[in-house]
Every structure is written in structure tokens, then in C-alpha cells.
Image: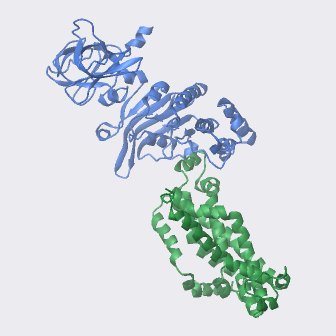
Amino acid sequence: MTSITLKNVAKRFGQVSVLQDIDLDIAEGEFCVFLGPSGCGKSTLLRMIAGIEATSAGELRIAGELMNDVEPADRRVAMVFQNYALYPHMSVYENMAFGLRQAKTPKPEIDARVRAAAQTLQIEPLLDRRPKELSGGQRQRVAIGRAIVRHPAVFLFDEPLSNLDAALRVHMRTEIANLHRDFPEASMVYVTHDQTEAMALADKIVLLRAGPEVRTRGSIAQVGAPLELYHRPANLFVAGFLGSPSMNFLPAELVGADADGANVRLASGETLRVAVDAGGLATGTALTLGLRPEHMRLAEGSDSQAIRRRVRAVENFGEYSYLFLSESSDEPLIAKISGDMLDIPDAPIALHVDPAECHLFDTKGDALPHTTAAAPQAARMD
Amino acid sequence: MANRNFQPARVAIPVLGLFWLAVTTLPFIFVVFTSMKTLQETYTNPVWAMPEQLNLSNYIQVLQGSFLIYLRNSLFVISVSVVLIVLVSSMAAFALARLKFRLNGPLFGLIVAGMIVPLHVTLVPVYLMIRTAGLYDTLFALIGPYVATSLPISVFILTEFMRQVPKELEEAARLDGCGPFKIFARIFFPLSGPGIATVAIYNGIMLWNEFVFAYVLTSSPDKRTLPLAVWDFQGQYASDIPAVLAVVTLSTLPLIIVYAIGQERIVNGMMAGSLKG
């Protein structure tokens, strides 16, 4: 069953259009992550679902009911704020009980729910403390506890981990994943600018774009499972946003196409085979070839499916190395190679490129369809 | 070397502080000492001499007069006024600080501009209004003008305070089911505690010393407040300087006690706006 439905939703602040053409379904129990660069309106979208921000246009439904004009407290949503937003003058217990008290829940039930949530989150010894006596991680737990006690249909998280240090962030990320497992019927909507968090937590990622393209193409760049966005980005924006270091983009020209794929010529003169359906396009069409740094490996012998460059710099990380290769444009071509690499300035190097892991984008920036199935690694695991 | 570390401020500030301490406490010491002297001593002994013995007869004389009635009147008028000031100004401050409505800015400006209106300009109209309302020569005659004249500064202080409460707390409260009034009463009012203490203490002190309205709006001795008491006693004991100063000491004492207890809050409250803003 669908939990949240957004139809043609838009948000404007005065003359400025922040969000446009949002069409989205979030299923019951689904963990949906809003991801995007700063200024893309992902927090605003979350706040619109919460009811803190009004929608400028379109329909917002929760569990089938139109919610555009419903008060936040009546939407069966609970929100965890970026800076926790705990009431400083109340104890942890009172913070968690406050919403239930406002809803006139009977006292014994409030007590039972608060204690159950405190137990789940292991904050029972903290119930009498004030927020300022807690560490960042503890505050985060209390904020989550305040959401749990309300038994909401939807949990909303607004960058909940961004104020924590790196180690605690990984830990709390697992706890949020556990929370999702403990409340299987509740949907979770989670805002982050951190793609690692998004990849780790999401059933579905909604990648939002910022900038002038919003007006022409809408706010949503792509919706899909994390691996789908990673392996089958729908356009240049998605391809460049997901993955670190980002995907390399090389100007290319179509030299031929058949049912299994296409041949493209790079500006450097090499011709590569790509498993992309370019059948509809004329030979000589200008395209962009997308290559993820992690999808290149050292070529052996006289590999025809290889690109040859000179090494500009090497960064060794022990487990893997980044090679910065000279490219005609200012942007270097980056390759991520497993193991250590010797840093020999200007050394020539050949890197093999798997046709199935190449992406082609047309002049509008849209991806051309692949001729092979997505996520080949996952398929091989069966 | 030592000279290079010499900072004039390190010497000047304590010296200035001591000087100011003398300026503010010496008159008070004079008042307290003299209030314990006999009338004869004030004429024969030097002005700054200690009293020859701990002589409380002046105090007894004053307390047996109508001093306690004045004190009771002052306490009543000021406590009612301060409660009203805190209630009205905190609600106004919440609306001005957090609610979005047309004319919010101009309205705030208008209220704050009230601070520059000299009180004396309003005396005649206020007198006429109080007469018309039939409140002349009652304690209630004072409460209205006291609240009204204290509101601009109080609204100003509390608005600054409430602007600093994070927006997320308001949003969390909305998600918890609070309407605007509950957000005010359960979140903003308790969180503005230091600001409210500042407003209460500051206005309490100002009103404790208020003379002009009390003089114009009351006439019978049993409806008068402490500042008028000093004035009355001055007429009554014109030549009895120690008795007059005993009245002064007694009427200042509550203020000194309040200030001693709340000093930190007053200072913090006064500076909060500038530091946190």
C-alpha cells in the first residue's frame, strides 16, 4: 500500500521556485532517502510532508488522505530534526512524553510508551536528565525516542547524523537501519547530502537537482533503488552526483551502432566499444562517454578496449590508489585501481574499459539505454 | 621588560571602579549612619561620624507611624503591575518575534517608539482618563499607567529574547500538537525565564521609585505608595533629619535585597541580547 503520494507538488518562496513537478510514491514500510546538493530543496520537501511548510501547488496524500491543509500533529508523522530540537527546559522523559500529553493520551499509556522507547534506544538511565547534560549521540537517541513514542505512520529524518562525529555517525546509521527493521510498517523519509548514508540506508533514493535545470526538467533527477541509480544513472547529473570520485565524462563521437552496442571515438582518437543502444542516432553524433573511476583496470597486452594516457599524479591509500591521468581538458581523468601504484610522473599507462560499464549521454544529458542488464555483479552472485 | 607589559587599563579600571563604588555607596552609608543618630548628634558631631550607639528609635518612630500602610500599598500595586507587565509583554513579544503577519515590523517599531515618549507629557490626559473612569485616588489608578509605561522596554527586551529561541523548537512543538498559544505557554514562556526575570526586576525597581503618577493620581494618605511616604515624612518631620533618613533606608531596603538576590540575572538579562544576537 502507498503511504505517501506527491502529485505535481511545487514550492515557491515568493518569486523563487525551489521545488517543481514532484511526482512521487513512497510505499508503506519503505525507506526513502531524499538526496541532492545543497539548495536542491530536499529539506523543504521533507518539511512539506511534515506540514511545517505549506505546499505551493499539487497534492500531498498520506495513507490516501489529502494532507495539504492538515495540521502537522494530525498527519501521523514524527520528525527527527538536524539539531535534535529537544526542549531544553524539560527532562528527557518530558521531552518524549510531551506530544502524547498534548494528544491527551492516558498517563499509564504515556509512561509505558516512553519506557518502551527508552529501552529500545538504551536511554533508560537518562530519562531524568536535561538535554544539555547529554552528549550528541544521546541527544540524537532522545530525538528518535520522541518520534518513536508517537507510533507514527511516517518517520521523517532531516539530516539527523550531520552533527555527529564520523565514528558515531556510522554507529547511529546502523541504529536507524535497526529502527526501520523494528517498525516495518512505518515509512521512513530521510534527508541527507551524504551519498554513503543514502546508499547504506535507502530502499529508494530520490535524487533532487538544483539550479536552472529545475525549471526546465523538474526537481527530481531520478528515483530508484540505490544500485539502480549507481549502475543506471538516467542523466549526467545523477551520473556525476553518485560515486566518489565522480564519474569521468569524456567527449565522444558515434562511429557506428548495432543491436549489441555502439562504437564511439574519443577526442584522443581511441575507439571504444560500449554496451549501449545508440541505434536511433546518426553516425558522427556528439555524445558524452561516462566512465566510473572504479570501473577501469590496468590493461594487459595490446588491448583494443583500452584508453592510453600519461600519469599526472598518484594517490595511494593502501587498499586502492587514485591515478590522475592527463586529459586534453583541464579536468584530469581519474582511475581507481586496487593495490599500490608507483608514482612515476608522465609514465604511459593503458586502462581497460568494460563495455558493459560505460555510459553514453546525448547532448541533452540523458542516458542512452544499455543493452545489458543492470547490476551485473549482483546477477553473478546468484 | 616589565614596562612593556604595562597595560594602563589594568590600573585604570580598578581605580575607576573604586571611585564609582565610593560615589554610589558613600551617600548610602551617610543615610544609614545618620538614621541611627539622635537629633542632637546630627547637630553636634561631624557629618561622617559613626553613630555613638546603635540607636533604632528613629526606626521605631517611623514604623509606628503610617509607614507600613505605604509599604503594603507599594507591594500591592507593584506586584499586580509586574505580573500584568510580564504577561502582556511576553505575549506581545512572542507574537512580534515569531508570528508572521502584515504590519509586524511597523507594530514593533511603534511599541518600541513608546520608550521615547516623556512620561510627563501623558500626565494630564492620564489624570483625566482616570478621573472619568472613577479610579482617582484608588490603588488601581496606578496599575494602568504603570503597566502601560513599562510595556515598551519590556516588549523590546522579551522580543529580543524570543527571537533567539531556535525555530526548530517551535516546529517540534507544532508536530507535537501545539497551537500558537501552547507554543507560547509551554515552550517560549519557560525558555524566556532569564528575560522575564530581567523585565520583572527592572520594572519592579522602576515602579518602586515611581513618584509622579502616584502623586497625581492619589490624594488620601492611605492610598499612597512609598516614594510619597518619604515626601510626606519630610513634611511631617521637617526638622528631624534622622527620622527622614530612617524612612529612606526602610524604603530602599527591599530593593537592595531584590538586587542582591537577582543581580546576576539582571546583568545577564541586560546583556543577553547584545551577546547572543
Q: Position of residue B234 (x, y in %)?
A: 73, 90
Q: Which residue is pictured at 21% across the width and 6% down the height?
A: A302
- Which residue is at the front of the view, B191 or A209? B191
Residue at the far left: name it.
Answer: A284
Total number of numbered discs in the rendering: 0
Q: Which residue is pictured at 49% across the width and 40% down the height?
A: A49
- Which residue is at the front of the view, B254 or A375? B254
In this rendering, position of residue A380 left or right of residue A211: right
Q: Which residue is pictured at 46% across the width and 34% down the height?
A: A192
Instruction: Find chain B in the image and tell me its colour.
Output: green
Please give the letter of the chain rendered in blue: A
Q: Is residue B85 visible?
A: yes
| Quarter residue B219 falls in | bottom right
Q: Position of residue A181 (x, y in %)?
A: 58, 24
* Residue A346 higher or lower than A104, as above or below: above
| Quarter residue A204 falls in | top left
Q: Position of residue A213 (x, y in %)?
A: 29, 38
